Amino acid sequence: MLNAQLNLPWPELVAGVREDRLPSGIIYNAMRRFHPDTREWDGGELTDRYLAGLAAYADVTYVDKRTHEAFRIARQKSEPFAALDRHIEKTGSYDAIPGQLTAYFAQAAAS
């Protein structure tokens, strides 16, 4: 989208932008680095790692408890990550998410 305005030569642009410079790449690499090591992986954890890369673009991102902990650690240890981090949540029940989002957006609108 940005290149539509800049009108840069696409091959040169793609060659010059590395994954570790993109917000999603910074987040994904931090998740790989700081995610608690577990002997057994739950299928949801892998999905959360991929979805976590979208956190820089979303107002609120819901992840599992291990990924939430990785976000907390990454915030403390990675300045580039902390600059991108938005609102990360975990919940014990999918049923609670609508109420949590309503409260979050009501608080954001009031401030």
Image (cartoon, rainbow, N blue to C red):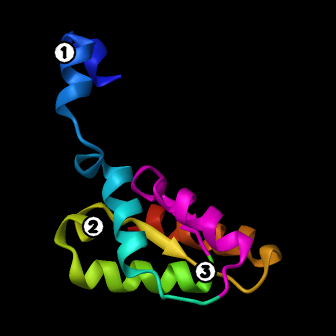
The amino acid pointed to by label 2 is: Phe
Residue nearest the viewer, comparing 85 with 23? 23
Q: Position of residue 64 (x, y in %)?
A: 63, 79
Q: Going 39% across and 55% down the picture, which residue do you hit?
A: 56
Question: Which residue lies under the disc numbered 2?
Answer: 81
Q: Measure how far apart labels 3 and 2 are at the Cα level.
A: 19 Å
Q: Is residue 28 above or below residue 68?
A: above
Q: Position of residue 15 (x, y in %)?
A: 21, 27
Question: Which residue lies under the disc numbered 3?
Answer: 90
Residue 55 horizontal side relative to residue 3, left or right: right
Report the magenta residues as a range: 40-63
Query: Dot 1: within a 10 Å radius of its alpha carbon, few (fewer than 14), some, or many (20 or more) residues?
Result: few
Instruction: Assess whether residue 59 is covered by the magenta stretch.
Output: yes
Q: Measure how far apart labels 3 and 1 are at the Cα level.
A: 38 Å
Q: Position of residue 107 (x, y in %)?
A: 49, 71
The amino acid pointed to by label 1 is: Leu
Q: Secondary structure at mark 1?
A: helix
Residue nearest the viewer, comparing 31 with 79? 31
Question: Which residue lies under the disc numbered 1?
Answer: 6
Instruction: Assess whether residue 103 is covered by the magenta stretch.
Output: no
Q: Secondary structure at mark 3?
A: loop
Residue 8 horizontal side relative to residue 105, left or right: left
Q: Is residue 109 above or below residue 104?
A: above
